[in-house]
């Protein structure tokens, strides 16, 4: 699991917008967003938060919080979505489905943090 999470972190988080936007859906092994489907170039903040929580649960605390930070800073800083967090956005901030519920997965990060092994 950790090897898979590390690969996702390196390709889908760090290689996308310098790790500042969250985890992009479809990254190819050579570090390019897969042009084969529309959702590949999107970040889904709720899925990003769930990924971050999984990383924290697996002992990848630094990576998990860095992943979540990109989504949170995009939501509340760069794009100003605040209480209307969308289902998805692109690197430009174009979005789909404002007020989506999946971003409530951010609470899984707290649970993972509280349940981590010391």
Image (cartoon, rainbow, N blue to C red):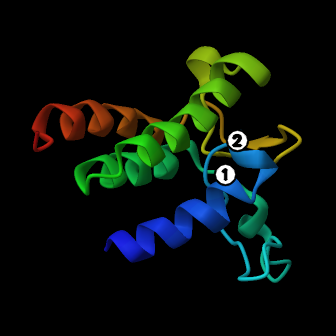
At x 69%, y 29%, the residue is: 74
At x 76%, y 55%, the residue is: 16
Would you call the spot at circle 2 few (<14 residues within 10 Å), some (14-19), or many (20 or more)? many
Q: Quadrant of the C terminus?
A: top left
Q: 95 and 62: which one is in front?
A: 62
Q: 77 and 113: which one is in front?
A: 113
Q: 3 and 67: which one is in front?
A: 3
Mark seen at residue 43: 1
For label 1, the SS is loop
Can residue 7 be seen?
yes
**Is 14 on the left-hand or right-hand side of 104?**
right
Residue 39 location, quadrant = bottom right
At x 43%, y 75%, the residue is: 4
Rendered position, 72 above or below 56: above
The picture places residue 116, in percent across and down from the top left corner, at 15, 41
**Is 118 on the left-hand or right-hand side of 84?**
left
Residue 23 location, quadrant = bottom right
Confirm or deny contact between disc 2 and disc 1 (CB under 8 A). yes
Rendered position, 15 above or below 118: below
Q: How many marks?
A: 2
At x 26%, y 52%, the residue is: 59
Rendered position, 2 above or below 82: below
Mark seen at residue 21: 2
The picture places residue 47, in percent across and down from the top left corner, at 48, 52
Q: Comparing marks 2 and 1, which lies closer to the viewer?
A: 2
Can residue 89 be seen?
no
């Amino acid at each position: 699991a950790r090897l898979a999470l590390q690969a996702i972190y390196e390709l889908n988080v760090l290689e996308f917008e310098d790790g500042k936007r969250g985890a992009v859906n479809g990254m190819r092994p050579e570090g390019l967003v897969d042009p084969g489907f529309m959702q590949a170039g999107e970040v889904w903040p709720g899925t990003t938060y769930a990924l971050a929580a999984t990383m924290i649960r697996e002992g990848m605390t630094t990576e998990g919080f860095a992943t979540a930070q990109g989504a949170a800073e995009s939501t509340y800083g760069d794009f100003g979505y605040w209480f209307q967090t969308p289902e998805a956005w692109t690197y430009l901030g174009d979005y789909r489905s404002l007020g989506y519920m999946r971003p409530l997965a951010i609470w899984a990060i707290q649970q993972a943090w509280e349940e981590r092994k010391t």
